Amino acid sequence: METLRDALRRFERAGFRDAFRAEREGLRAIAAKRTYAPEELVIDEVARFEGDTDPQDEAVLFAVRADDGSVRGTLVATYGPQGDARLAELVHRLETAHRARTA
């Protein structure tokens, strides 16, 4: 079974080298020092991790790129009672934009 760490390494080898984090304005590519609206990003792959015994271990790893191709990176979203509401909203917008593109 692939772990979160394994998936991060796999995505990095595939060229997703930046890391995104949630900020008030959107998702920030840390190395590129640029913030994107979720609608400006494209999901290339998703890896889900279920907590076997603890719901706080549930996470989703997104391999994303800017729609102009300038940045490729990963975003980790954890779920459970301690989840970040701002991140949850940004992920919802990211997934909604992805569904609209692939419909």
Image (cartoon, rainbow, N blue to C red):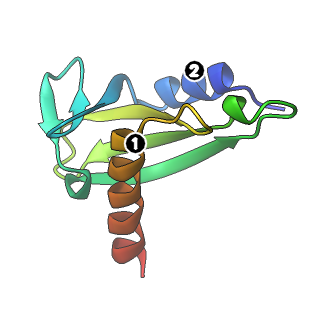
Q: Residues within 10 Å of mark 1 (few under 14, many from 20)?
A: few
On the image, the x and y values in percent for residue 96 come to: 38, 67
| Quadrant of the image occupied by residue 99 | bottom left
Foreground residue, 4 or 14? 4
Residue 21, compared with residue 98, is above or below; it is above
Foreground residue, 79 or 96? 79
> Would residue 16 appear left or right of 50 to someone viewing this image?
left
Q: Secondary structure at mark 1?
A: helix
Q: Secondary structure at mark 2?
A: helix
Q: Residues within 10 Å of mark 2 (few under 14, many from 20)?
A: some
Residue depicted at 56% across the width and 48% down the height: 46
Residue depicted at 42% across the width and 60% down the height: 95
Identity, as a three-letter code, of the amino acid under mark 1: Ala
On the image, the x and y values in percent for residue 75 come to: 42, 34
> Would residue 37 appear left or right of 85 to someone viewing this image?
left
> Would residue 27 appear left or right of 48 to someone viewing this image?
left
Quadrant of the snapshot with the C terminus: bottom left
On the image, the x and y values in percent for residue 80 come to: 62, 38
On the image, the x and y values in percent for residue 39 come to: 23, 58
Quadrant of the snapshot with the N terminus: top right
Instruction: Spot the residue most to the bottom.
Output: 103
* Residue highlighted by disc 1: 85
| Quadrant of the image occupied by residue 49 | top right
Residue 9: image tag: 2
Residue depicted at 57% across the width and 20% down the height: 9
Residue 88, compared with residue 96, is above or below; it is above
Question: Alpha carbon of mark 1 to alpha carbon of mark 2: how far?
Answer: 27 Å
Count of picture labels: 2
Q: Nearer the viewer, mark 1 or mark 2?
A: 1
Residue depicted at 86% across the width and 34% down the height: 52
Identity, as a three-letter code, of the amino acid under mark 2: Arg
